[in-house]
Image (tube, rainbow, N blue to C red):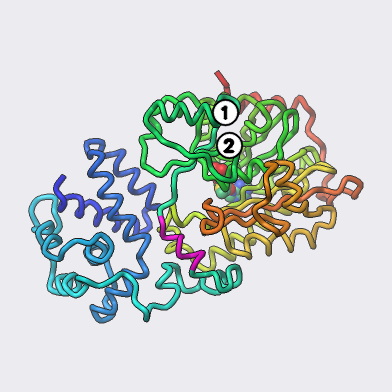
């Protein structure tokens, strides 16, 4: 591809992302899957153009508006401005690449030429930029960040425009960390142990992961260190009965099953049967055979009532704003609206309320999000504990000591990881225990019949993953 053809592709994909055709990684990944002839260098260049814009969008738009009256920035103008401001292109190089020839962008219009010319030599940041512009997030989130980070907002949000490294989880059913690291090195990939999670390896380069033997043989999986820690902190042990309630495509399910050494019963629930289906191949690759997949109609599905107080661990990886993953999904912040936060917090409260029923006396409810917004995290836990006196928070120092054994990285009773402080995604974990002697949670009006083991086994047979 010529540089111009790469720009034209980036413009088209940015248009699709902007029109809500999907998350950036789906749109870009889908394009590359449909156009397999696009070479590795072209793919890297196209992705770099797109992600440079998504990461710096507020700053780019601020400059465009400043230089160009209040003109609404479009995909072309954003790209041209980013080439000059972020990628250091000369205005003449932009003009040369956009000559209107086949597969290349049309020549720059007068306004576009003017913006590109005026941006030459400018630095990305300007002292007059308001904080949400400087740090590239929507205005309405400023108060939320202030509540969480106080005078550290700049430092904490400043790193959210960086690129995240690639974290891998070593599958303890098949390898230990040192073996997996050696196997990666044998395939030419240098990996470092993650500082907090004993199961993690970190890679700073782009690698063709799916082609590596160490991946194909199920010894490693992609998983951010924060997610690995969340699963470890559940302390799911061999022989336990465990639910992964919002299991999706099984990222945490795989980690929980490894902690259980493939022994005991692990139910992976989700309202999306399609996502659960995507877990099958991953479970098989990891050699996991103790997982039952259970699609639900909602968090209030009858299955929940039928299994009241029958699980040692209930893991809730709640649907959330994903504000902790902006380094990986920079476009997500621009799709997020205040109403989404309201709807998500209501859904999280309902999921917590319903899943509490599943926990045995003495068992634990583990709530996790990949968000850093207090309303989804500590606020949610405060409300839950007030309305569910049968549960008590297990202090994080205690959970961490039992699960990880190193010094706990926070002094609070819940865990809020941030990219700035911990180098992980922004991840939250709270562990609550149902008091052993407490009366049962309020039960539904219709008497709950506990499922017999035979029923459970029959359900398991339908969805059970063949480990072969
Ligand atoms: C954060 S994602 C889970 C990611 C997954 N645990 C992993 O590690 O790959 C949240 C999941 O919650 C599911 N979900 C949304 N609403 C739900 C509900 N009412 N009950 C159960 N699951 C729900 C979504 O389908 C989504 O898969």
Q: Tell me the distance, in whole angstroms, between the alpha carbons under discs 1 and 2.
A: 8 Å
In the rendered image, residue 186, in percent from the top left (x then y), is placed at 40, 26
Task: State whether residue 416 is above or below residue 213.
Answer: below
Where residue 436 sits, quadrant-wise, is: top right
Mark 1 is surrounded, within 10 Å at the Cα level, by few (under 14), some (14 to 19) or many (20 or more) other residues, namely some
Mark 2 is surrounded, within 10 Å at the Cα level, by few (under 14), some (14 to 19) or many (20 or more) other residues, namely many
Secondary structure at badge 2 equals loop
In the rendered image, residue 302, in percent from the top left (x then y), is placed at 72, 43
Task: State whether residue 415 is above or below residue 224.
Answer: below
Q: Which residue lies at the image location 58% right of the left edge and 53% below the top edge?
A: 427
Question: Residue at the top extreme?
Answer: 468
Marks 1 and 2 close (CB-CB < 8 Å): no
- Could you tell me what secondary structure mostly forms the magenta stretch? helix
Of labels 1 and 2, earlier in sequence is 1
Question: Is residue 271 shown to the viewer in this render?
Answer: no
Please tell me whether residue 227 belongs to the stretch shown in magenta: no
Query: To which residue does mark 2 refer?
Result: 199
Q: Which residue lies at the image location 44% right of the left edge and 73% below the top edge?
A: 132
Label 2 within 8 A of ligand 1 by Cβ: no
Query: To which residue does mark 1 refer?
Result: 176
Indicate the quadrant containing the C terminus: top left, top right, bottom left or bottom right: top right
Indicate the quadrant containing the N terminus: top left, top right, bottom left or bottom right: top left
Horizontal side of residue 148 vs 309, given as left or right: left
Q: Which residue lies at the image location 43% right of the left edge and 41% below the top edge?
A: 203
Please tell me whether residue 160 belongs to the stretch shown in magenta: yes
Question: 110 or 17: which is nearer to us?
Answer: 110
Q: Which residue lies at the image location 28% right of the left edge and 62% below the top edge?
A: 86
Magenta range is 155-162
Secondary structure at badge 1 equals loop
């Amino acid at each position: 591809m010529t540089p111009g053809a790469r720009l034209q592709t980036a413009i088209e994909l940015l248009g699709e992302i902007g029109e809500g055709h999907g998350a950036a990684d789906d749109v870009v990944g889908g394009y590359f899957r449909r156009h397999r002839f696009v070479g590795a260098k072209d793919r890297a260049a196209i992705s770099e153009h797109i992600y440079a814009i998504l990461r710096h969008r507020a700053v780019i738009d601020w400059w465009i508006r400043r230089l160009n009256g209040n003109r609404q920035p479009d995909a072309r103008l954003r790209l041209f401005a980013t080439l000059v401001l972020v990628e250091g292109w000369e205005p003449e190089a932009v003009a040369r690449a956009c000559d209107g020839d086949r597969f290349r962008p049309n020549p720059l219009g007068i306004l576009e030429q003017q913006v590109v010319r005026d941006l030459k030599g400018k630095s990305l940041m300007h002292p007059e930029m308001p904080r949400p512009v400087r740090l590239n997030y929507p205005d309405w989130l400023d108060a939320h960040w202030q509540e969480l980070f106080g005078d550290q907002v700049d430092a904490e949000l400043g790193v959210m425009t960086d690129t995240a490294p690639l974290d891998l989880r070593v599958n303890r059913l098949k390898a230990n960390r040192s073996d997996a690291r050696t196997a990666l090195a044998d395939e030419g990939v240098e990996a470092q142990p993650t500082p907090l999670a004993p199961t993690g390896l970190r890679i700073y380069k782009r690698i063709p992961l799916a082609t590596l033997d160490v991946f194909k043989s199920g010894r490693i999986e992609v998983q951010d260190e924060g997610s690995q820690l969340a699963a470890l902190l559940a302390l799911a042990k061999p022989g336990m009965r465990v639910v992964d309630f919002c299991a999706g495509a099984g990222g945490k399910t795989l980690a929980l099953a490894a902690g259980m050494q493939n022994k005991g019963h692990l139910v992976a629930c989700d309202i999306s049967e399609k996502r659960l289906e995507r877990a099958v191949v991953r479970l098989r690759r990891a050699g996991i055979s103790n997982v039952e997949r259970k699609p639900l109609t909602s968090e209030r599905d009858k299955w929940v009532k039928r299994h009241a107080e029958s699980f040692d661990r209930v893991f809730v990886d709640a649907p959330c704003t994903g504000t902790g993953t902006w380094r990986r999904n920079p476009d997500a912040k621009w799709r997020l609206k205040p109403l989404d936060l309201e709807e998500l917090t209501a859904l999280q409260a309902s999921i917590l309320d319903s899943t509490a029923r599943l926990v045995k006396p003495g068992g634990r409810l583990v709530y996790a999000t990949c968000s850093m917004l207090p309303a989804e995290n500590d606020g949610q836990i405060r409300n839950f504990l007030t309305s569910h006196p049968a549960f008590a928070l297990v202090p994080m120092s205690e959970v961490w000591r039992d699960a990880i054994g190193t010094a706990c990285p926070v002094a609070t009773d819940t865990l809020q990881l941030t990219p700035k402080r911990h180098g992980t995604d922004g991840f939250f974990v709270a562990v609550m225990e149902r008091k052993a002697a407490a009366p049962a949670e309020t039960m539904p009006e219709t008497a709950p019949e506990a499922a017999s083991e035979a029923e459970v086994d029959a359900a398991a047979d339908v969805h059970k993953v063949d480990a072969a």
